[in-house]
Image: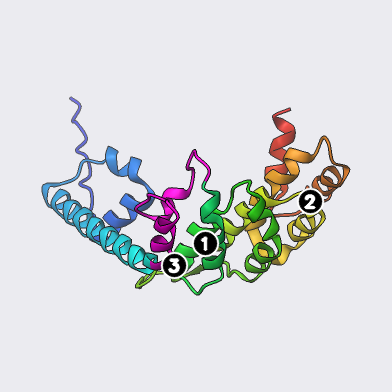
């Protein structure tokens, strides 16, 4: 006669474990059979998180109030600065305002949003190349306080946003400087976002092609460049 093996009871999840699963392994959390008590705590975690997000958005909007007011004055009908990112129509009238505010002492989150909003092919952005380069080089990397009023550290993003702007703003005249920046390992992984400008020009511009060959051995960039060759 065989006996059925009883399933070993799972150790109840702590609140910290639930938060970790929710943030980093949501699919695994979906597959788990939570107890009623765990489900109740998860709902409370979600409520708290939603409230924190709402408060964070409100603080961001307050920080960006002056910038938004200036954008509204030139006809930009947006609720948040981030609404500019990916906008289908041109907003050339907003570029001088964005460039002015780019160098102001905003939080990392707002600076990233402004920088990504400048990742557009506009003559005014191209003319501002020296400003973009300077702001990119001095932008911090790693983790830190990202938004106004934050108490937790997040991965900083302003440098990535500025890299996106540089990759779009580069011209044949400024390509050599972009290559120099891409080769500068002290600028970290954000240089990955500069590669799109080189990839786009590699078949037409010898400088871009040569730079890609040299950067192919860079530890931060090698995997991305190798993936281009696999797709051929």
Q: Secondary structure at mark 1?
A: helix
Q: Going 55% across and 67% down the picture, which residue do you hit?
A: 100
Label ID, residue 146: 3
In magenta stretch: residue 180: no
Residue 10 in view:
yes
In the rendered image, the residue lying farthest to the top is 1
Magenta stretch in the rendered image: 66-90
Instruction: State how far apart marks 3 and 1 are (Cα).
Output: 22 Å
Q: Nearer the viewer, residue 146 or 57?
A: 57
Q: Which residue is mark 2?
A: 215
Q: Going 38% across and 69% down the picture, which residue do you hit?
A: 63
Decide: few, some or many residues near mark 3? Use Cα within 10 Å; few <14, some 14-19, many ≥20.
Answer: many
In this rendering, the label closer to the viewer, 2 or 1 = 1
- Left or right placement of residue 37 versus residue 119 in this view: left
Decide: few, some or many residues near mark 1? Use Cα within 10 Å; few <14, some 14-19, many ≥20.
Answer: some
Q: Looking at the picture, how far across and down is residue 84, in whole percent?
A: 46, 49
Q: Secondary structure at mark 3?
A: loop
Decide: few, some or many residues near mark 2? Use Cα within 10 Å; few <14, some 14-19, many ≥20.
Answer: some
Residue 157 in view:
no
Q: Nearer the viewer, residue 166 or 7?
A: 166
Q: Looking at the picture, how far across and down is residue 181, in whole percent?
A: 74, 60
| Position of 18 relative to 99 (above/below) | above
Q: Secondary structure at mark 2?
A: helix
Q: Which residue is mark 1?
A: 97
- Mark 2 / mark 1, whichever is N-terminal: 1
């Amino acid at each position: 006669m065989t006996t059925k093996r009883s399933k070993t009871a799972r150790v109840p999840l702590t609140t910290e474990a639930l938060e970790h699963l929710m943030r980093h392994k949501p699919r695994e959390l979906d597959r788990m059979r939570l107890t009623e008590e765990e489900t109740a705590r998860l709902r409370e975690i979600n409520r708290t998180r939603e409230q924190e997000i709402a408060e964070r958005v409100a603080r961001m909007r307050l920080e960006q109030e002056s910038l938004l007011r200036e954008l509204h004055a030139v006809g930009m009908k947006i609720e948040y600065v981030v609404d500019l990112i990916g906008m289908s129509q041109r907003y050339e009238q907003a570029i001088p305002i964005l460039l002015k505010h780019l160098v102001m002492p905003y939080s990392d989150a707002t600076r990233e949003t402004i920088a990504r909003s400048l990742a557009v092919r506009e003559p005014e952005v191209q003319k501002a190349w020296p400003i973009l380069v300077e702001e990119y080089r001095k932008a911090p990397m790693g983790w830190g306080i990202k938004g106004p009023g934050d108490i937790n550290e997040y991965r900083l993003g302003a440098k990535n946003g500025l890299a996106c702007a540089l990759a779009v703003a580069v011209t044949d005249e400024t390509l050599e400087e972009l290559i120099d920046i891409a080769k500068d390992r002290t600028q970290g992984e954000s240089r990955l976002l500069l590669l799109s400008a080189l990839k786009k020009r590699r078949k037409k511009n010898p400088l871009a092609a040569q730079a890609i060959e040299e950067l192919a051995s860079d530890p931060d960039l090698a995997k991305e460049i190798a993936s281009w060759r696999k797709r051929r």
